[in-house]
């Protein structure tokens, strides 16, 4: 992966019959991002704090990216968005050292390695921007995502029961996983491993 300061188009990867390439989110991607969000099953959006199918929410997302509050990467297959990641950090909060990773993958692009590529991209940015702790949220039935992040060193830390409610009024639990970036780096130093995250 390239560094955060030089992020742009990444090489095209082809797995599971799907070509995709990664690049940083831009203002002109708003319509493609909305179309992508509306193709994601509603249940898979439940871990997000806002409904990204709403144009106002996407506009706010783009604004926050321009202000540097969110670092987002999109995966494109042709002109179509098939995946997105966001690294969210609030430097004015009580937790400026904490970043949250949010990843969405189009149903037909799952199993292609795209989720790992987007997770790795966010983790690389976290290292370069001094984030000390990373968290991810998801519903407990998102087993593939749980396995991916656990493989990358994240560990479950909390289960929030009936935390979110969908449009039908059905409640769902949210599980939170976390990774101590400094502890992982220290462990790598002790064992003489490369100074990067699992999956590099």
Image (tube, rainbow, N blue to C red):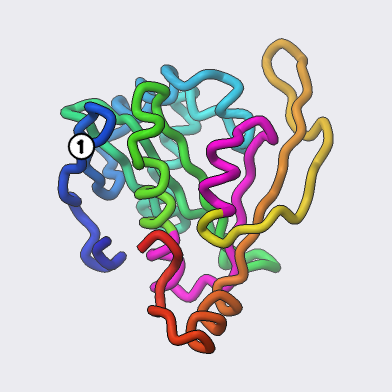
Location of residue 31 by image quarter: top left
Closest to the observer, 100 or 12: 12
Task: Name the spot of residue 19 as percent of width and height, x first.
Answer: 20, 33
Q: Which residue in the protein does label 1 denote?
A: 14
Task: Pick the quarter of the image with the C terminus.
Answer: bottom left
Say which residue appears at 53% left-offset and 88% top-offset: 190
Magenta-span inclusion, residue 36: no
Task: Residue 99: tell me if it is visible.
Answer: yes
Q: Secondary structure at mark 1?
A: strand
The residue at 39%/64% (across/down) is: 125
Q: How many numbered dots are placed on residues in this image?
A: 1
The 10 Å Cα crowd at callout 1, few under 14, some 14 to 19, many 20 or more, is: some
Q: Position of residue 146 (x, y in %)?
A: 60, 43
Q: Residue at x 56, y 78 (%)?
A: 182
- Residue at 63% x, 39% y: name it: 138
Q: Is residue 122 above or below residue 21?
A: below
Q: Residue furthest top?
A: 168
> Furthest residue to the front?
191
Q: Is residue 96 visible?
A: no
Q: Tell which of 114 and 22 is nearer to you.
A: 114
Residue 134 magenta-highlighted = yes
49 sits left or right of 19 in the view: right
Q: Percent x, y for residue 174? A: 72, 38
**Quick check: 107 left or right of 30?**
right
68 or 76: which is nearer to us? Answer: 76
Q: Tell me: 129 left or right of 171.
A: left
Q: Quadrant of the N terminus?
A: bottom left
User: Residue 124, percent across and down?
Assistant: 39, 65
For residue 180, side relative to residue 77 (left or right): right
User: Which residues fall within the magenta stretch?
Assistant: 123-150
């Amino acid at each position: 992966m390239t560094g955060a300061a030089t992020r742009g188009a990444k090489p095209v990867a082809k797995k599971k019959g799907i070509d995709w390439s990664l690049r940083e989110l831009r203002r002109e991607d708003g319509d493609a991002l909305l179309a992508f969000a509306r193709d994601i099953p509603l249940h898979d959006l439940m871990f997000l704090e806002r409904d990204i199918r709403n144009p106002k929410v996407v506009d706010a997302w783009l604004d926050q990216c321009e202000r540097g509050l969110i670092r987002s990467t999109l995966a494109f297959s042709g002109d179509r968005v098939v995946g997105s990641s966001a690294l969210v950090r609030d430097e004015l909060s009580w937790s400026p050292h904490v970043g949250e990773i949010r990843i969405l993958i189009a149903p037909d692009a799952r199993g292609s390695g795209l989720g790992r590529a987007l997770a790795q991209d966010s983790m690389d940015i976290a290292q370069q921007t001094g984030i000390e702790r990373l968290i991810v949220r998801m519903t407990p039935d998102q087993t593939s995502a749980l396995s991916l992040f656990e493989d990358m060193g994240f560990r479950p830390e909390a289960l929030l029961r009936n935390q979110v409610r969908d449009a039908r009024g059905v409640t769902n639990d949210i599980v939170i996983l976390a990774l101590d970036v400094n502890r992982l780096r220290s462990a790598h130093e002790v064992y003489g491993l490369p100074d990067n995250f699992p999956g590099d």
